[in-house]
Image: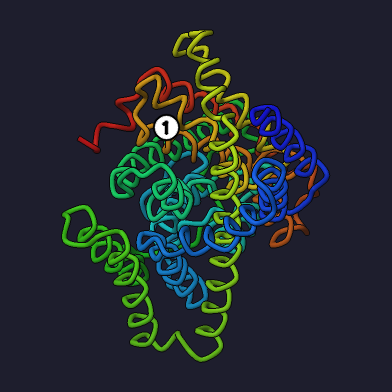
Amino acid sequence: MSVAIGFTGLAILLLLLALRVPVALALVAVSLGGMTTMFGWDTAIGMLSSTPYEFIAKWTLSAVPMFLLMGFVCYHTGLTNGLFNAAKVVFRWLPGGVAISSIFASSGFAAVSGSSVACSAAMGRIAIPEMVKGGYKPSFACGTIAAGGTIGALIPPSILMIVYGVFAQVSITQVFLGGITIGLLTAVSYCIVILMVSWLRPDIVPREATGARDVSPRQALIDIWPVLALGVLVFGGLFSGFFTATEAGAVGAAGAILIGLVLRRLGKREMKDALLETLSTTSALLIIGVGASMFTLFLSLSGVAGYITSAVGGWDPSYLQLMLIVVLIYLFLGLFMEPFGAMLVTLPVLLPIFELYDVSLIWFGVLLVKLLEIGMITPPVGMNIFVIKGVAGKYASLMDIFKGVSTFLIADIVVVALVIFYPQIVLVLTG
């Protein structure tokens, strides 16, 4: 009977999500209703009163607001603005060099933001006008930045990876290390796409280095020293074992504030905006997390998680069959759900299955973030697409931007396939 209630709750949850009910509200409502049906109102209220504290009080989660604050301070003070010019110094000689520069600038921005939306917004304002001026087709220019923005959640510090590490109870530092390789692989695959389009369709991507302003290497280095210093401080301490993830976030936030003050770019308005955005983003994430924790408990007590694990074990799918199902699930969810909701709704069901198959949860976490980020550039709810439309809407329509990003989706699928067939791509740095 409890299993039937669990599956009913799962079906109701999917229905609520399809009706665009907020993820956190849907998770809490289904969990509360299911627990009431199984054990009574008092037990359900007891879960509702205890779960928020049990989830939010996890010390590791304090890394989330710290890294968010670091990213928002860097964004509002313009500390990352020089990344694009610095990348052009290195890559402008290549066919499609300005677009390639924007991809690597996005990778640099990712190292201090952890957010694909912030990455898309920042790079979109800087790079799209210059690409259009240089002869790039506007739709492709916008698609390049939308795709490049997804790197923001792959290269650490990734907020998605922090939350995954807490839920899966794996080392966040190890997941970060795996994210470095898949983030760089994604950047390289995007650059290959740009080179191929430049070669096959010079009407879309000019072969000559046009539209790029002259920037001396010395000036480029001066422009990016704050980001370099911050990166060395945070990741040097984190990956050497000197800092925990939480301590690294706190040091990074303090470092960003200090650099902003020294450069006189951080005033009251910038600090207020950074703090408010950090508070609102953190609150939204934690509310979803509380709902997911309640839903996990509901599925566990109803027996659904164990039933699904037993069913999969009885079916005994091969590794490739299992991964194909997982990929299709997340590509489908990415069509209408934002990444955090999609991740936290599915982890209670999928994690036991991967433990049964003895799959590395560090590897799966990195692959999961990659799949979730593909959803950021797929219609109809590709968040990065709407961000680009907001910052560069005068250059291309929403449909044109979706068309411009389609070629990069092919590269994403290739990267996913490589990671599935060759897990060591992710695990090479994790030891």
| Residue 323, position as x, y percentages in the image | 50, 20
Q: Residue furthest right?
A: 19
The one of 391 and 431 positioned closer to us in this rendering: 431
Q: Which residue in the structure is indicated by mark 1?
A: 364
Question: Can I make out residue 4 in this image?
Answer: yes
| Residue 316, position as x, y percentages in the image | 48, 8
Query: In the picture provided, is 69 more to the left or to the right than 202?
Result: left
Give the amino acid type for the residue marked by disc 1 in the picture: Phe
Helix, strand or loop for disc 1: helix
Residue 325 higher or lower than 155, as above or below: above
The one of 401 and 149 positioned closer to us in this rendering: 149
Q: Residue at x 33, y 49 (%)?
A: 172
Q: Residue at x 51, y 17 (%)?
A: 310
Question: Can I make out residue 81 in this image?
Answer: no
| Residue 92, position as x, y percentages in the image | 44, 49
Where, quadrant-wise, is the C terminus in this rendering?
top left
Q: How many numbered circles are shown?
A: 1
